[in-house]
Image (cartoon, helix red, strand yellow):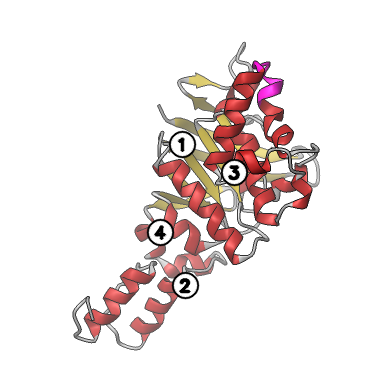
């Protein structure tokens, strides 16, 4: 069953001189097992949208349905949607506070009232999902670990709630290249191997192009464009007009095309770019 967002609108500080429409006429379906990328410049409505999906903000118009239930209908308990739809904010490691890794990851399941044996199973499962060794790290202080490890501990704390859907807001922000690669590898595995629906908010076009099945482009509180990575990044002029970059390989293809090369501008991976260049040079793909 998909998450269905229908005609939602949200305005900050309505009726005041500071009134600002954050979302307008948003319609979106997010299917189970999919990987959705959300891009857009700062202030385009990305963060407001994901807080609606998680039930942190209530739409002033429209509705949000998760697993066939309107999450704002009378009698619906919002903590249910927050268990189903996990939300990892930007720099989640700043929210770590327990003295050991185990206690931090176990915080959510313990508040759910689970038995200690179930809590331990969930913590082990969540740490394994993000590539952290349970036995060697469970009693370590999270504050003595690397930035990438702390980020993964914070994500594990959300995964320990066993969400069907996981929203990540700029999960690689501020990490070094190794930390970024590790985080993205585990996010990819969560989706492809565990079937967790991923909703990724990012400014990194290379990341979203490589990982997402579908991308939506936010602009002034609306969805201005949506489609597969190939469809979205084929219109580089549109993205540039909105102040967004292209993936590195797409930018290269655009420059080559401007110089007379017969290449596809929608290419966004190194391997596809290699094939396009070799084809133009008259070489075989194995050259």
Numbered disc in front, either 3 or 1: 3
Residue 175, numbered label: none
Q: Tell me if mark 1 has few (under 14), some (14-19) or many (20+) residues whose alpha carbon lies within 10 angstroms of its own.
A: many
The vertical placement of 64 against 97, above or below, is above
**Pointer 2 residue:** 248
The picture places residue 154, in percent across and down from the top left corner, at 67, 42
- Disc 4 and disc 2: Cα gap in Å? 14 Å
Q: Residue at x 40, y 41 (%)?
A: 193
- Name the N-terminal-most of marks 2 and 3: 3
Q: CA distance from mark 2 to mark 3?
A: 34 Å
Query: Looking at the rendered structure, which numbered label has been put on residue 196?
Result: 1
User: How far apart in space, not on screen, are marks 3 and 1 (Cα)?
Assistant: 21 Å
Q: Is residue 51 left or right of residue 12?
A: left
The quadrant of the rendering that contains the N terminus is top left
In the picture of the structure, the residue carrying the numbered disc 3 is: 133
Is disc 2 placed on a helix, strand or loop?
helix
Magenta residues (range): 109-115
State which mark lies toward you, 2 or 3: 3
Question: Dot 1 lies on which element?
Answer: loop
Q: Residue 257, percent across and down?
A: 34, 81
Nearer mark to the viewer, of 4 and 1: 1
Dot 3 alpha-carbon crowd within 10 angstroms: few under 14, some 14 to 19, many 20 or more: few
What separation in Å lies between label 3 and label 4 (alpha carbons)? 38 Å
**How many neighbours does mark 2 have within 10 angstroms: few (below 14), some (14-19), or many (20 or more)?**
some
Name above or below for residue 71 compared with residue 213.
above
Q: Any mark on residue 232, and which? A: 4
Front-lying residue, 276 or 102 = 102
What is the x, y in percent for residue 8? 56, 34
Marks 1/2: CA distance?
A: 28 Å
Q: Are marks 4 and 2 in contact (CB under 8 Å)?
A: no
* Rendered residue at 79%/47% (across/down): 18
Q: Residues within 10 Å of mark 4 (few under 14, many from 20)?
A: many
């Amino acid at each position: 069953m998909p998450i269905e967002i229908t005609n939602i609108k949200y305005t900050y500080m309505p009726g005041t001189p500071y009134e600002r429409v954050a979302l307008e006429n948003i319609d979106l379906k997010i299917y189970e097992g999919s990987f959705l990328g959300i891009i857009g410049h700062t202030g385009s409505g990305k963060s407001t949208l994901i807080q609606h999906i998680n039930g942190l903000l209530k739409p002033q118009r429209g509705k949000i349905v998760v697993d066939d239930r309107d999450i704002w209908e009378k009698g619906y308990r919002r903590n249910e949607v927050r268990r189903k739809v996990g939300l990892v904010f930007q720099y989640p490691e700043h929210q770590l506070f327990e003295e050991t890794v185990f206690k931090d990851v176990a915080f959510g399941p313990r508040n759910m009232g689970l038995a200690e044996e179930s809590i331990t199973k969930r913590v082990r499962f969540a740490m394994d999902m993000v590539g952290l060794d349970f036995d060697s790290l469970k009693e370590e202080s999270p504050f003595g670990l690397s930035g990438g490890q702390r980020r993964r501990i914070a994500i594990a704390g959300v995964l320990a709630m066993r969400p069907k859907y996981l929203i990540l807001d700029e999960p690689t922000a501020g990490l070094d290249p190794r930390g970024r690669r590790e985080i993205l590898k585990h996010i990819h595995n969560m989706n492809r191997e565990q079937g967790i629906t991923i909703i990724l908010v990012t400014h990194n076009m290379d990341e979203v192009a490589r990982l997402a099945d579908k991308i939506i482009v936010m602009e002034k509180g609306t969805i201005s464009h949506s489609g597969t990575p190939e469809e979205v990044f084929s219109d580089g002029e549109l993205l540039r007009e909105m102040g967004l970059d292209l993936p590195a390989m797409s930018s290269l293809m655009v420059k080559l095309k401007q110089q007379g090369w017969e290449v596809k501008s929608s290419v966004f991976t190194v391997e596809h770019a290699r094939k396009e260049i070799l084809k133009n040079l008259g070489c075989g793909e194995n050259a």
